[in-house]
Amino acid sequence: MELEKSIRRIGRKVCFAHSAYHMHVKFEERKTGISSFQVRSVEELKEHLSEVDVVVISMMWRNELLRDAPNLKYIQSISSGTDHFDRGALRERGIRLASASGANANAVAEHAMALMLSLRRHVHTGRDNQSAKLWRGMISDLDSREDELAGKTLLVVGYGRIGSRLGKIAKAFNMNVIAVKQDVSVGAESADEVYDKSRLFELLPRADVVALTCPLTSETENLITASALRAMKPSAHLINVARGKVVDEGALIAALESRSLRAAGLDVTREEPLPPESPLWRLPNVLITPHTAAETCAYEDNVIDILIENLSRLGRGEQTLRNQVV
C-alpha cells in the first residue's frame, strides 16, 4: 500500500509507447493502482500525450512531442541509449529522464558472443548453404577455415554492464580479454588487462576480435575510423552491438570488400532499417541482425523494474533516479 501511494504521487497515468513490446500487460500485472495504456505508433501517441504524466518509450520518441505533453513529468527510456532525447529541453521543462541501462546487459552480451561464434564457426554461411541445398566440402585454405575462440584476444571497447558481462563470457571460452573504458579504476574485474580509452589505437593491432559495447556519445561517434580499421589485424573480426554511428560505415564496407578486415557481425547500422541498396547486405563476410541484441522474453519485466523503482523514488521526493540521465 505504501509503495502504491508513493508511486501515485508522481504518476496518475502512464503511457507505454512501443510497436512490439507488451509493456502495458506486464505493468498491469504489478497491480500498482496507476492507470496505464499502450500505443503502437507515433500518431497514436500524439493523440493521447496530453493525458499522461509518464511515458515509457524509446525510438518512437520525437523531441517535438514535448509541445503536446503539458503534464509530462518523467520519461523512462525502454532502451539504454538516450541520445535521441533533447536533454536541454527536458531540463528546461523539469522533466526527468532515466535509461534502461542494465536491463539488456546479459542479452546483448550473449548476442555479441553469438555473433563472434557464428563468424568463427561459419554458421552464417552454413545457413546460406542450407538455403541453397549445398553440402560444402572441407576448406583447405587456413585463412578461410573455421577457427576457435580459445586463445584469441578480445578487445572490448566500453566496459560497462554489457562489456563486462561479455568479458566474463569470453573468459569461459578461454579468451584473453582486454578492456578499454573511461574509468579504469572500477568495474573491470573480469578483464586480463584494462586501459584508458586513449590507448585504443595501440591496442587494436593485438585484437583478434574487437567488440563495441560503448554508448553513443560525442566522443564515441565515428570512433572506429578508416585509420582504426587499418590498425586492426587483417584476420580480425569486428562486432558492433553498440550503435551504428560508432563506426565509419563507408570505411568498414571498404575494409570488408578489400578483405583488409576478415569479417564483421553487426546488430546496428548507421541508418535503421538498413537500406536495401547498402553493400552490407551482399557481403558474405558480414553477419547482420536487425538491432535485436537486447531482445529477450524478460525485457519488459526488466524495464518495468526500473520504472517502478524510479516512480517510487520520485514519489518519495528523492532527487536521484536509477540510471538517471536528466
Image: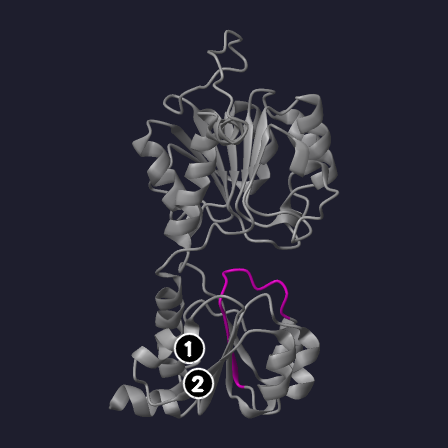
Which tag, 1 or 2, sits closer to the chain's start?
1
Instruction: Give how far across and how far down residue 35 sits, in percent.
Output: 41, 89
Query: What residue is disc 2 on?
Result: 36
- Which secondary structure, mark 1? helix
Q: Quadrant of the N terminus?
A: bottom left
- Residue density around tag 2, few if under 14, some if 14–19, many if 20 or more, within 10 Å: many
Residue appearing at x 60%, y 26% in the figure: 232
Of 145 and 163, nearer the camera is 145
Instruction: Give how far across and how far down residue 168 sits, in percent.
Output: 33, 39
Above or below: residue 30 compared with residue 315: above
Q: Is residue 83 magenta?
A: yes
Residue type at tag 2: Ser
Above or below: residue 91 compared with residue 302: below
Above or below: residue 179 compared with residue 86: above
Instruction: Give how far across and how far down residue 303 sits, in percent.
Output: 40, 67
Residue type at tag 1: His
**Identity of the residue furthest to the top in this view:** 140
| Circles 1, 2 touching at the beta carbon (< 8 Å) | yes
Q: Is residue 254 magenta?
A: no
Query: What residue is disc 1 on?
Result: 24
Residue appearing at x 28%, y 86% in the figure: 3
Residue appearing at x 59%, y 65% in the figure: 59
Of 265 and 196, nearer the camera is 265
**Identity of the residue furthest to the left in this view:** 1
